[in-house]
Amino acid sequence: MGIRKLGHYSIRTGDLEASRRFYTEVLGMKEGFRPPFRFPGIWLYLGGDEGDFGVVHIIGIDRDDPQALKDYLGDKEEVALTGSGAVDHVAFLATDLAGMRARLAARGAPFTERTVPSLGLYQLFVADPSGVTVELNYPHDEARALGLA
């Protein structure tokens, strides 16, 4: 199957600083490296998980320039970002990019794909039957071998 483990979960928020304080001051996570996305956010780490890209990704909403976030992850109404509606996606670390692309195509499951800037990760995004976005992260070398990167 190729899915190795849960990679992270992402929360979309209108109050990035409140989320930062909660996850760092209350839960004790550490803020760390985040790729240079064109929208605000922070990546939080437990310690020792730097190679796995953090455990919680907080996605901020830039009210002055919301288009960058919409372009990358799609649009969500800010009023819907409470409770479980704030969970933007669940991500897994995976292998066998070619096999997953073939399974999705065989089932007619639409997906989007992209390279993460500066991380050497290739991503597939697909919605589950309930509309939850699932992100699958593959080593960039797999994408390059397929001529995708």
Image (cartoon, rainbow, N blue to C red):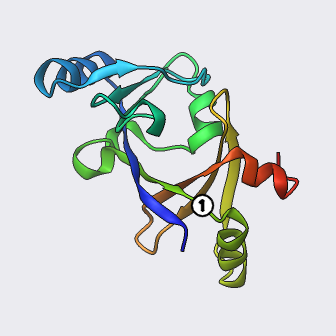
Residue at 48% across, 59% down:
134
User: Where 131 sits versus 67, above or below?
Assistant: below
* Residue 96 rendering spot, x and y as whole percentages: 65, 65
Q: Name the image quarter holding residue 69.
A: top right
Camera-side residue of 66 and 108:
108
Q: How many marks overall?
A: 1
| Residue at the outermost front position | 48
Q: Nearer the viewer, residue 135 or 74?
A: 135
- SS under mark 1: loop
Q: Quadrant of the N terminus?
A: bottom right
Query: For the point 67% across and 29% down, which residue is it?
Result: 117
Q: Residue furthest bottom?
A: 106
- Give the vertical position of 128 relative to 49 (above or below): below
Identity, as a three-letter code, of the amino acid under mark 1: Thr
Residue at the location (40% across, 71% down)? 130
- Quadrant holding the C terminus: top right
Residue at screen point 71% across, 45% down:
140
Q: Which residue is mark 1?
A: 95
Left or right? Give the position of 36 relative to 4. Answer: right
